[in-house]
Amino acid sequence: MSRSLTPPAPRPPHTLRTVFPVLALCWLAVFFDGMDVNIYGAVMPHMLDDTGLGLTPDSAGTIGSWTTFGMLIGALTAGNLTDWLGRRLMLVASVSLFSAGSALCAVAGDVALFGAGRFVSGLGLGGLMPLCLAMVLEFAPPRRAALTTGLLMTSYHFGGMAATGLGLTLAPAAGWRWVFWAGVLPALIAVPLLLRLLPESPGVLLARGERDKADAVADRFGLPRPTEVAAPAAGAAGRLAAVRELFRPESRWATPLLWLASFCGLLLVYGISTWLPQMMRASGYGLNSSVSFLLVINAGGIVGLLIAGRVADRFGAVRVSAIWFVLTAAGALLLKAHLPLGVTYVVVAVTGVWLFSAQVMVYAATNTVYRDSERAAGLGWVTGVGRTGAVVGPWLIGELAASGNESWGFTTFALAGLGGALAICLVPAARRFGRGGTKAPAPVAASAGS
């Protein structure tokens, strides 16, 4: 008799403790994601000083956009490949791809080859984040969705701090190329662990017709056994249907607002991760201080995520994201002024508290808009469309830097913060408008936002 016809086996309670193995493995993968994304910004001042490479502020911004353009493609295609490979193998492929891109950057002799390496890295990076977020949200207790998302995303900032540490120590001593060789470590460390220890998504297993395996994984981690309603759609036709579901009456207006908020948030995240050291250097700060600002803002990001996750579980991810965006805008305007070094460190750290978690709470807010079966598609498109902001941010600041107007970058960041706040603020009203002002059953993780 099929297991699906038998009563569920005794399973552990569905708590943060039961999700810990999945959270820990995804945390490691996102740690290396954050390291790879921030490596470029951490070593850019050294690369601009390397006349043999031929990098200029203009081409540096273009290459930053190549990276994020690769992320856009990776984020939008990862869902379709997941149908064939599953989320676990797609995570392995993503880590392997951005490690290979880092190796290509390390051996590049000119700007074109270096840019190709960053594009390859972007393909892997783009697929990794939505996959890890979808995995953790699937395994997390519904009432701890925002907290679990925040805990996961602390790893991005620990990775950013590791990249900055490499930029401060390894780059001056051995050259910027060795920092990119360090970017090959994910393939050697994370890939074997993911292959051996990470479970497959029960929803994906069910969508592929593997009911017994799906139930076994759910029972092992204390999850409810997946149903056909909760399973993501499979195949190209299923993916198209899933995208159409994002525009059903209840979410047709909320979806573009989430996309806009994600665009603004990722413009901030990747614009600052790529250009903050060079912008601060152009403002008159020393090379080591300018690079160390990247370390400080990521440290602030870790604190912010730990605060935002707990606050959002109580007051709602939408409300927290909006306030955090406004505070980010205020911090960006303060950084435009040349303050004393100690004060600047404090402003950078506090801005980091708000900046990164504002974007992460946009992800957490998707649980208030989309049903279980729409979660992966909704999150994938929020991150994917948002990647256009990640493309625009580095390119736009690069254009400003090439014309000697780096300081206008801080104004750009402030405007992006205000735009993100407005967009995410309108999401609850858009949901009410979409369903005609009537109450509808809340999504499973409604306590995480709205």
Image (cartoon, rainbow, N blue to C red):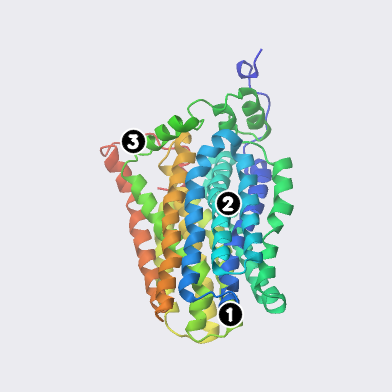
Label 2 residue SS: helix
Q: Viewer-proximal residue, 33 or 155?
A: 33
| Residue mark closest to the camera, 2 vs 1 | 1
Where residue 320 appears, as percent x and y from the top left, is 44, 57
The x and y percentages for residue 166 are 67, 71
Rendered image: mark on residue 51: 1
Is residue 77 something one can see in this rendering? yes
Residue that label 3 marks: 248
Tell me the residue that label 2 is attached to. Answer: 124
CA separation in Å, label 1 and label 3: 54 Å
Q: From the image, state whether disc 1 or disc 3 is nearer to you.
A: 1
Provide residue 20's location: percent of width, then percent of height. 67, 45
Question: Quarter of the image containing the N terminus?
Answer: top right
The residue located at (38%, 39%) in the rendering is 246
Viewer-closest of 432 and 163:
163
- Which residue is painted at 60% across and 65% down in the image? 160
Amino acid type, callout 3: Arg
Q: Which residue sits at x=58%, y=82%? A: 287
347 w.r.t. 216: above or below: below
- Please name the amino acid that badge 1 sits on: Thr
Look at the numbered disc 3 and give the secondary structure of its residue: loop
Image location of residue 275, percent across then percent down: 50, 72
Earlier residue among tags 2 and 3: 2
Mark 2 packing: few (<14 Cα in 10 Å), some, or many (20+)? Answer: many
Q: Is residue 310 above or below residue 334?
A: above
Q: Are marks 2 and 1 in contact (CB under 8 Å)?
A: no
Nearer to us of marks 2 and 3 is 2
